[in-house]
Amino acid sequence: MVKKCLLVPALACCMELAALADTIQLKDKAAVVGQVLSEKRDMVAVDIGYTVLVIPRSQILKVSKTESSSPEASMSRKAVPEPETRVESPVPAANDSAFYATVTRPLPVRSVRDLVNDLGEAVVQVRTPSGLGSGFILNSEGFLMTNFHVIEGETQISVEVYHWTNGELERKSYKQIRIIAINKFGDLALLKIDDKDAPKFKAIPLGSSDALAVGDSVFAIGSPLGLERTVTEGILSTKTRPMSGDLYLQTTAQINPGNSGGPLFNLRGEVVGITNMKITFGEGLGFAIPIESVKYFLDHRDAFAYSNDNPSNAYHYLQPPSRTRQASPVD
């Protein structure tokens, strides 16, 4: 049945070409069927579909043209409209480790206002007895990123998440927070919300800081000086600002204490960096950790796993093998 269905349109196509073709009668009682492209005094050029034949006039008896063989008609026959391409909306897709989300196709550029309404639910506050920072949700299971200095030396950590309830954002505090991995030197920390009543969380896709260009618009969401859910907008000043031996994104988006650990977004709604510091005696001089460094940390999180036996370091060292006891010499 499949072969029959495919054969019918093929025959129809062949009949259509034959109806529109020209016929060149040759002296040896043969004929060439195709489209005459040009006629000169000593030869005729014929398009037979897969190639072009040049036939000497001395071999031709007669050339029979169809009415539609004019240049205008031939152009109309060739100008077959291509089928309309459907533009699929980009969908966040999990990376190879299925731990954080990226996108398979570029997301559309949108206004900061629209993006804040969509992404605000996934930006969180990280509270400790000594201070306040920001963070963002990586996946629906409650894993989230923040800065190491936000939780450094702390044993009591709570995370405040804003859930959409009846068309409004309602703040809920979660107190069962587990430290999964830390990198003190990279100022990165991976946490997890372990509360039993925790729902599925909304996650934010990670973008690429390598794809940014100087002058691109960016914006940050965080809680500077405790002013929760503050949005600041600016541009990318430079991609490679050296600070303390590392390279940072520099932005004019206002960054203040409390923004630490929060996301820096591009206008496609992707996280391109984690805000972590500013120049104290200056304005519009904020800095963020490039998201490529964050991806490396997440992809190798087992190497940075937090250990209760060694809480001040990101690395867990195994116990060395016991020494072999030497036998006492025999008298």
Image: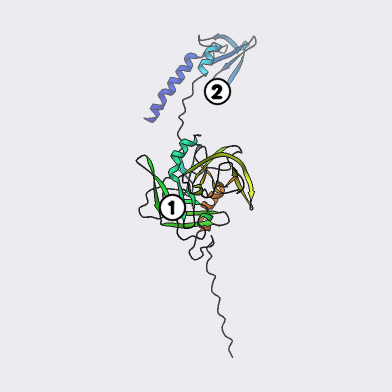
User: Which disc, if any, is residue 159?
Assistant: 1
Density class for disc 1 (Cα within 10 Å; few <14, some 14-19, many ≥20) is many
Helix, strand or loop under label 2? loop
Query: x and y percent of residue 169 in the render?
Result: 39, 43
Q: CA distance from mark 2 to mark 1?
A: 68 Å
In the image, residue 260 sits, relative to residue 85, either above or below, namely below
Q: Nearer the viewer, residue 101 or 236?
A: 236
Q: Position of residue 231 (x, y in %)?
A: 50, 41
Say which quarter of the image contains residue 166. Answer: top left
Which one is in front, 33 or 304? 304
Q: In front here: 305 or 62? A: 305
Question: In the drawing, does residue 194 fall left or right of residue 238?
Answer: left
- Residue at far bottom of view: 331
What residue is at 40 percent from the left and 52 percent from the top? 173
Q: For the residue marked with disc 2, what is the amino acid?
A: Tyr
User: How many numbered badges does the structure rendering display?
Assistant: 2
Marking on residue 130: none
Q: Position of residue 219 (x, y in %)?
A: 53, 40
Q: Residue at x 42, y 23 (%)?
A: 9
Q: Please name the residue that numbered disc 2 is placed on.
A: 50
10 Å neighbourhood of mark 2: few (<14), some, or many (≥20)? Answer: few
* Label 2–label 1 contact, CB within 8 A: no
Q: Is residue 33 visible?
A: no
Tell us which disc is closer to us: 2 or 1.
1
Query: Please, what secondary structure does the residue beneath circle 1 have?
Result: strand
x 49%, y 14%: residue:
20
Earlier sequence position, callout 2 versus callout 1:
2
Q: Position of residue 110 (x, y in %)?
A: 49, 34
Identified by mark 1, the residue type is Val
Quadrant location, the C terminus = bottom right
Q: Quadrant of the N terminus?
A: top left
